[in-house]
């Protein structure tokens, strides 16, 4: 918890220096992965452009598109298919949380939408945690890059994950 509070306070301190017009960046084919390690808990937040998961970023218009969105939600909810911490750490997954975008009637077809997923693990030997394998690229072929950030007791780090290098290591 201390790590999370420290990270939150750093973000709060840096916020006034950001331009007032800065918004949430959205890049097709690129997602974000955030890993927070706090004592025996790992929280992993994944943000994917909806286009990566289903090929469109608007409310589904057909039964086929509704089925694709439902399948992506189900797949993202399968923690073992998405992220696997170092086996030696003895981590147990809690139920995943997947959040689909809410579409408004005024949202146009050119709008951007993201799917967010959160994964939480409890680990018996957190000091053995050295890597998090991802199956994200295998399951979402339109994804070509994940910008990953990690914060934990051994420090902070950034890493770019790709289909050829899909594991976060430290």
Image: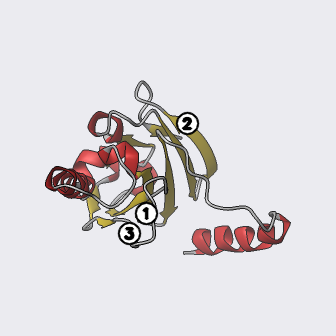
User: Callout 2: 10 Å neighbours few (<14), some, many (20+)?
Assistant: some
Q: Nearer the viewer, residue 22 or 82?
A: 22
Residue name at image x 29 percent, y 34 percent: 138
Image coordinates of residue 74 in percent, x first then y, are 19, 57
Question: Helix, strand, or loop for circle 1?
Answer: strand
As measured in the structure, the alpha-carbon distance from the residue carrying label 1 to the one carrying label 2 is: 18 Å
Residue 43 image label? 1
Tell me if residue 86 can be seen. no
User: Badge 3 local density, few (<14 within 10 Å), some, or many (20+)?
Assistant: some
Instruction: State if disc 2 and disc 3 touch (CB < 8 Å).
Output: no
User: What is the x, y in percent for residue 22?
Assistant: 73, 61
Residue placed under numbered mark 3 in the picture:
103
For label 2, the residue is 160
Mark 3 or mark 2, earlier in chain: 3
C-alpha gap between disc 3 and disc 2 = 30 Å
Q: Secondary structure at mark 2?
A: strand
What is the secondary structure assignment of the residue under circle 3?
Answer: loop
Q: Residue at x 76, y 64 (%)?
A: 21
């Amino acid at each position: 918890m201390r790590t999370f509070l420290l990270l939150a306070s750093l973000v709060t301190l840096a916020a006034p220096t950001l331009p007032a017009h800065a918004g949430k960046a959205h890049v097709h084919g690129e997602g974000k992965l955030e890993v927070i390690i706090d004592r025996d808990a790992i929280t992993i937040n994944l943000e994917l452009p909806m286009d990566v998961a289903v090929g469109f970023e608007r409310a589904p218009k057909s039964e086929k598109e509704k089925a694709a969105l439902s399948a992506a939600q189900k797949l993202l909810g399968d923690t073992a298919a998405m992220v696997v911490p170092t086996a030696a750490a003895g981590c147990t997954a809690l139920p995943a949380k997947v959040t689909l975008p809410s579409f408004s009637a005024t949202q146009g077809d050119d709008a951007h939408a993201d799917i967010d997923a959160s994964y939480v693990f409890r680990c018996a030997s957190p000091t053995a945690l050295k890597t998090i394998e991802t199956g994200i690229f295998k399951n979402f072929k339109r994804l070509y890059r994940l910008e990953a950030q990690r914060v934990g007791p051994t420090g902070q780090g950034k890493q770019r994950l790709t289909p050829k290098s899909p594991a976060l290591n430290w």
